[in-house]
Amino acid sequence: MVISAASTVSIRCKGVLFDMDGILISSLGSVERSWTQWARMRVIDPEHAIGIAHGRRAIETLALLRPDLDSEAELKIIEDLEVEDNEGLTVLPGVLELLAALPKHRWTVVTSATERLARARMAVGGIPVPARLVTANQVTRGKPHPEPFLAGAALLGFAPAECVVFEDSSSGAQAGRAAGCTVVATTFSHAIETLAAAHYLVTDLTGISVEQDREEMVLKLNALTER
């Protein structure tokens, strides 16, 4: 991957699709503690479990790690662990300002978390929770498959090409790109070389401005461009 110098980029769009963990909130401690506890219960290397779990639906992670177990039953266990562990959960920089600048009907959340977990985490973080969002419960194939972001665009009523995706993981960036969206990836949680599917790279959501232009929005951000 070849990265250019940072410059101001203007992106025209009609809708914005946000990943949750690593984009809106930092829940890394909760995720790692919960998966470590579950892995030890099931005699699995915790580090291996955590590595697979990031950016993936829990039910798919469970099926990969212990295909001999009932994935639905195991999902309830890991969901309970994560919902109950809110220690260190924080809203990431620039998030509340960007959400406040976006019209409510123009954005939603597309996450690999279950709906119960997503709503719980956003509530704890003080993030306005969209009336409708795309969670692990609404799709049959998770990221890196494009289905979650295709569903997100459809939920807003826009074509995928009219939407911008904000992601932090390789699987999420791949999913957004495959869906036909413009992908902006943050670089503070994952190595830049894993984010080749992104169109633009930013450190976080700080300083992103929103301008309304007729039926479109213009997002202005200081970004690195890939290629």
Image (cartoon, helix red, strand yellow):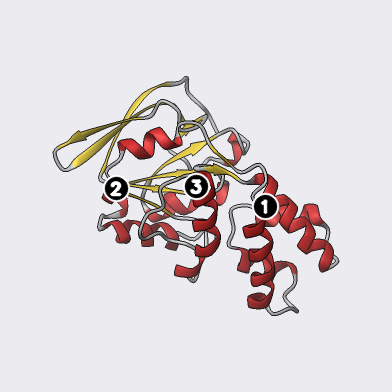
Q: How much space separates mark 3 and mark 2, taking CA atoms?
A: 23 Å
Q: Is residue 112 visible?
A: no
Residue 217 in percent (x, y) is at: 24, 38
Tag 3 residue: 173
Q: Which residue is mark 1?
A: 31
**Which amino acid type is shown beneath numbered disc 2?**
Lys
Q: State the residue at coordinates (42%, 61%).
A: 134
Q: Which residue is mark 2?
A: 104
Q: Secondary structure at mark 1?
A: helix
Quarter of the image containing the N terminus? top right
Disc 3 crowd, CA 10 A, few/some/many (<14, 14-19, 20+): many
Q: How many marks?
A: 3
Q: Dot 2: what SS? A: helix
How much space separates mark 2 and mark 1, taking CA atoms? 28 Å
- Residue type (three-letter) at the residue carrying disc 3: Ala
Q: Is residue 222 above or below residue 197?
A: above
Among numbered discs 3 and 2, the one appearing first in the sequence: 2
